[in-house]
Amino acid sequence: MNYFIGAAMGEETKVLLTLFIMLAAAKLMAELFERLRQPAVAGEILAGVFIGPSLLNLAAPSEITSILAEIGVIFLLFNVGLETKPAAILNVGKRAALVAVLGVLVPFVGGWWLMKIWNSTSVESLFVGTALVATSVGITARVLSGMGLLDAPTARIILGAAVIDDILGLLVLAVVSSMASGSVNYLEILTTAALAIGFTALVTLVGAPVITRIAPGVERLRSGHGMFVLGLVLCLGLSVAAAFIGVAAIIGSFLAGMALAEAGENHPKMHRQINGVTEFLVPFFLVNIGMQLRLDVFASSSVILLCFLVTVVAVATKLLGCGLGAISLGLKRAGQVGMGMVPRGEVGIIVAQIGLSLAVIGPELYGVVLFMAVATTLIAPPFLKLLYAGEPAAQQEIGPPDAGGIVASEDFCKIG
Amino acid sequence: MNYFIGAAMGEETKVLLTLFIMLAAAKLMAELFERLRQPAVAGEILAGVFIGPSLLNLAAPSEITSILAEIGVIFLLFNVGLETKPAAILNVGKRAALVAVLGVLVPFVGGWWLMKIWNSTSVESLFVGTALVATSVGITARVLSGMGLLDAPTARIILGAAVIDDILGLLVLAVVSSMASGSVNYLEILTTAALAIGFTALVTLVGAPVITRIAPGVERLRSGHGMFVLGLVLCLGLSVAAAFIGVAAIIGSFLAGMALAEAGENHPKMHRQINGVTEFLVPFFLVNIGMQLRLDVFASSSVILLCFLVTVVAVATKLLGCGLGAISLGLKRAGQVGMGMVPRGEVGIIVAQIGLSLAVIGPELYGVVLFMAVATTLIAPPFLKLLYAGEPAAQQEIGPPDAGGIVASEDFCKIG
């Protein structure tokens, strides 16, 4: 008889089981890694590698895990945005821009040059160069917020640079994609650039004052949880808007969070609710990255070598490029900024997917880029922990230990 | 160039847009309904009808909306379970059992008898009877928690009866499905019944003491948010377990919540995080119900008449059956219990889907059952609000207004 019920519920139950396995594996590995004094983030990505199709095959990436992963990283950046006041980013604007520009230029040239030496075609070289451009700031944000360091000056630079980096990466991808398909439409590229910059400026400069003004009215709404609901709607709405313009959805949610940051200070309840959503969904984001890794790429030794070389170039060029942009802060801080920009995560994977869908890179090179994306994401967290060791932690937290919470208990009570 | 990026992101952006529309429409209608002094729940379901394929066609049910809806109702019942100590349910056990048994018997006979008069086949009649059996307690739980009335004595009876009702409904469905396919395997049915009852007893009686014991250790876990993570893992894990046994997944999450209820009392942070997840996901559950409604069912007047009759019988028989089971509490409370058991929601829809997949009911009758499921779900909330008007509300809340929160602010500070 379970057969009959299974007829209608089978699929949904299987999905629930997959989600359960992803969540449980992530949290188990997170705990293990914390006990080994390694970053939980790396453990959760490795959990994905273990349970994924390459090893235990307990779970596989699907449309549903992808969308949960996407919502997860959207909320992660929203959460980070909530801790980031627009002024703090604008203050580091010039340096962040320099970090972003050098962090786009150096990896692009490095990747392109490596593939040229490797005797690849021009288009392949351009695509690998492009895949090395885009930083996935989610991983770094997770590590820094876990250490309570989102307030550190270099954290601000990394966040600001990530936004600019994403817009620049979008433009590089546009040019390269156009070249791959034969013609470059400069007008269209200029329009998109203008849209992306306009969107960022609008949300950053106009969004915050407007929201601070309407916040008291929102909290009085009859249907309850006013600020939380406003946060959810803004977070999803601006993510969609960003994606339509062509920037990553997470840029939209980060800007949404930033627009809410000032008004949100007086709403610890909203913070904790958003934090709950984030904590629930982020494991799907991290595990999903790990599950993408196909170990069968390592079939030939030349592919293994290429994986290694591309990853080395990916790490070295971001460290060098972004570090150079921040060198005036001293060597240690330049290292923090450079390492913070190393993870490529899902952004590198998206570039590789576009290359694959345009048939300008083959499945082997796709595998190499995938490996690079996962490897850079795994390499950065331990080094970030080392580079940031000893920095004074603030009260904020998103992913971290013990009783804490987003707002320290005393602050909570003053408000509550 | 957006074309190129769209090539890889198009699908995901469309899904994000759908989710944004669902969330925004739900919250807009919730606010409107609250201002009209109607229950927000009804507004959110109607939002689904409006944006769904039948009317504006802005969003349609898909695998992803279904799974988000499923996770949403799983968390809703988990949340309700968190407010329900096992003792409170065991205290009302006998009465709840009586309510459940009569609430299964009367609607089943009523539905069967109506279809017989309508000149349907025996199998069709049995299926409509079965579709009238299973209560979807999510809607009632949402209304009562919104009013802060999860502590009311009749709320306990409704929750207890819903668990028993679900097990009985499972057995009726098993028998009817077996009959439809020609042979009844009594041994298998008995096994399933034993499993379902054993699972419920195990979690209720053994789960709570075990969790209360391990809670302090869990909260000290290095990876942070220990109790919250334990809650998430238990909630998903027991939902999957319940679904594998053949009971509804929400019964598993309700029991998981109940097992955590005592240990969770000292963890207001966990409550608020779970509350955030629930508030984010529940709109997808409610809107998804509304989106299922196909208005093209109303093509023929005989179908309209049948929709009307089946819905009337569905409401009347649950009111009568469950009310009779609680009549010793007086007429008003019997009415509260009866009305609380009226919504069929997704459970009725699942029965209809099984009938459709076994080819024992046609698409027209499927449409009728769907209409009944949505209609009973829309009818109950306003009457529940009326029937419970004047009851003293407790501090708890899940879906409700203003600054409140799960725990009153002063309590929070004593702990924080």
Image: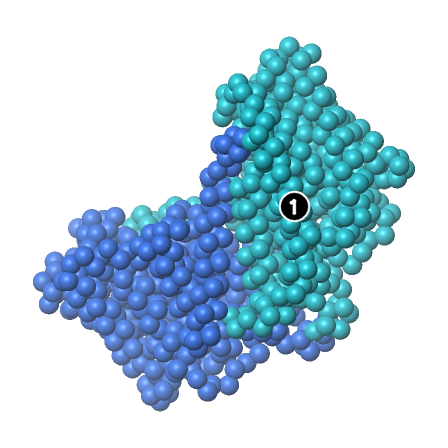
Chain colours: A cyan, B blue
Is there any visible trace of residue B72 in the rendered image? no
Picture quadrant of residue A128: top right
Give coordinates of residue A382: x percent, y percent.
Answer: 76, 39
Quarter of the image with the C terminus of chain A is bottom right
Protein chain holding label 1? A
Apparent side of residue A23 relative to residue B329 in the rendered image (left or right): right
Question: Dot 1: within a 10 Å radius of its alpha carbon, few (fewer than 14), some, or many (20 or more) residues?
Answer: many
Q: Can you say whether B285 is above or below B413 in the image?
A: above
Picture quadrant of residue B129: bottom left
Apparent side of residue B16 relative to residue B343 in the rendered image (left or right): right
Apparent side of residue B126 relative to residue A163 in the rendered image (left or right): left
The residue at the point 46 percent across, 54 percent down is B21
Residue at mark 1:
A200
The residue at the point 52 percent across, 49 percent down is A20
Question: Extreme top residue here?
Answer: A119
Q: Can you say whether A215 is above or below B177 in the image?
A: below
The residue at the point 64 percent across, 61 percent down is A211
Between B104 and B144, the one nearer to me in the picture = B144
Between B220 and B70, the one nearer to me in the picture = B70
The residue at the point 35 percent across, 89 percent down is B330
Give coordinates of residue A182: x percent, y percent.
Answer: 53, 18
Question: Extreme front residue here?
Answer: A187
Give coordinates of residue B124: x percent, y percent.
Answer: 17, 58
Picture quadrant of residue A316: top right
Give coordinates of residue B58: x percent, y percent.
Answer: 39, 51
Q: Which amino acid does label 1 sit on?
A: Thr
Is there any visible trace of residue A63 in the rendered image? yes
Between A206 and A14, the one nearer to me in the picture = A206
